[in-house]
Image: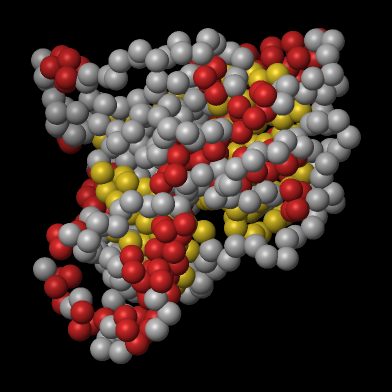
Amino acid sequence: MTKPNVLIFMTDHQRGDTVLPGGPAKTPNAAALAAEGVTFSQAFCPSPHCCPSRATFMTGLYPTQHGVWHNVDVANAIAHGLAEGVRTWCEDFAEAGYRMHYHGKWHVSHYESPADRGWENGEPGEWSDRPLPNRWPGYEKLASRPERTLHERAEGEIVMPGYPPYTLYGTNQGNKGDVKVTDRGVESLKTLAAEETDRPWCLFVGCTGPHDPYFVPQEFLDMYDPDEIELPPNFHDDLRDKPNFYRRTRDIFDQLTEREHREAIRHYLAYCSFEDDLLGRLVRTLEETGQAANTIIINVSDHADYAGEHGLFSKGVPCFRGAYHVPLVVRWPEGIAAPGRTVDDFVSHADMAPTLLEAAGIEAGREFTGSSLMPFIRNKRPDEWRDMLFTQTNGNELYGIQRAAFDRDWKMVYNGFDYDELYDLKNDPHETRNVVDDPANREVVSRMMRRIWQFAHETGDKCINPYIMVRFAQYGPAHAFRRDEARTGEAKGREELIPAARRDC
């Protein structure tokens, strides 16, 4: 078999359940891919943010390793690009002779363009002197305008004094940027087909939808009956047993009525259908140009969206599944065994670099945090595969150190800025009841914190400062190396170490 071509369609903010059978969204093109490929039903991003997740997709490493934590294009980000010495799979592809075409959202580095990482579009170094944004002039201009009050707000609008107007949803002619990006992708497919060469190619099409605010053409909105839109089962979670930051986030969206929440969900789903339509255009062009047989198509998103869960929208520090569970559908007519399968094992963005390199027959010569998914694609489940996934975030643009681990039964969230969380996923799949203070769960907290610190050690996490004012973990980093449970303080009971009563203050 010759080296495969690769077509990657990456959306922004798309939930994993929008491409699963019986899911809430109408995504026929993703469904058609799934029928001829493999759906990874338990795919997760490492961080609820575009830049760190995209950097993980491109490098096979977690944020502690690749160095991207926030939006690289904002002035107060911890870092504005990949750490020194970090390499992307794109560079390996380019060196192996692939023709590399990139269109759309990048968000891996502020100072490097895709051309600096092996892609042919643009010139290397063209972004090296880009200034970071200065938002003060915009705020100064905003101050000259009258401020709206809560009583004056429009449909779907959220009013916050001193901030620009924000409307969560509405209708328009569609995301013109994503249409243009898809147009360029279509033209690239035609150009690649017309070139008389045996060189394989890789095409990345990066859209910005269904990112909030959710503005979509009426035709896609009409696909969803407003009377059939349901609020999530955890919508009425008051978050009283969760970090204060979570409640403060929900306060923003509590301006909306329940009807507006339903409309926001409806518009979000319509936006997913709009993006699916763009995916369909690319797939049809691929087939019409005769390049489909040996082309790997990857339908994926950088991260997801709460879409009304716990009364929230968008994504952020609240460490709920909705922001982390992403679509991942792979079609490869010449390479997939038993198409139409669904794989329910835990997979991650960090798995994509080793997967693509193995599929292309390229020796990386370096280690990844993730592992290749090629055994699953060949319908040969590895004898050993992970039983747990981990997340890493230092907050969005407001810092908030958080690390989490989850398996099929439990989810543990270490919050460096507030109290921790533990969810019994078997009995509470919607993460509504924080049971971290239940003495019956001491062993679970200990075990999960050990796994969090072990992963932190493996990935070089630097958030291990022992200063007394930052000793907030249920168990500290030394717990990564503990084997004697009696020495952890559990014999006394954690209620003696961290009194739960103070949480009521």
**Residue 96, visible in the rendered structure:** yes
Is 86 displayed left or right of 248 in the figure? Answer: right
At a point 60% along the width and 53% down the height, the residue shown is 347
Compared to residue 461, the image places residue 296 above or below, namely: above
Looking at the rendering, in which quadrant would you find the N terminus?
Answer: top right
Give x and y (percent) for residue 122. Answer: 54, 11
At a point 25% along the width and 41% down the height, the residue shown is 398
Give x and y (percent) for residue 296. Answer: 75, 34
At a point 22% along the width and 19% down the height, the residue shown is 134
Is 93 displayed left or right of 57 in the figure? Answer: right
The total number of labels drawn is: 0
Q: Which is nearer the eye, 195 or 323?
A: 195
Looking at the rendering, in which quadrant would you find the C terminus?
Answer: bottom left
Compared to residue 139, the image places residue 63 above or below, namely: below
Q: Which is nearer the eye, 340 or 302?
A: 302
Compared to residue 250, the image places residue 91 above or below, namely: above
Task: Please identify the quarter of the rendering in which residue 133 is found.
Answer: top left
Farthest bottom residue in view: 491
Is 485 displayed left or right of 368 in the figure? Answer: left
Farthest right residue in view: 1
Q: Which is nearer the eye, 421 or 433?
A: 421
Give x and y (percent) for residue 86. Answer: 49, 35
Give x and y (percent) for residue 278. Answer: 63, 25
Compared to residue 148, the image places residue 417 above or below, namely: below
**Residue 15, visible in the rendered structure:** no
Colour scheme used in the picture? secondary structure
At a point 60% along the width and 62% down the height, the residue shown is 386
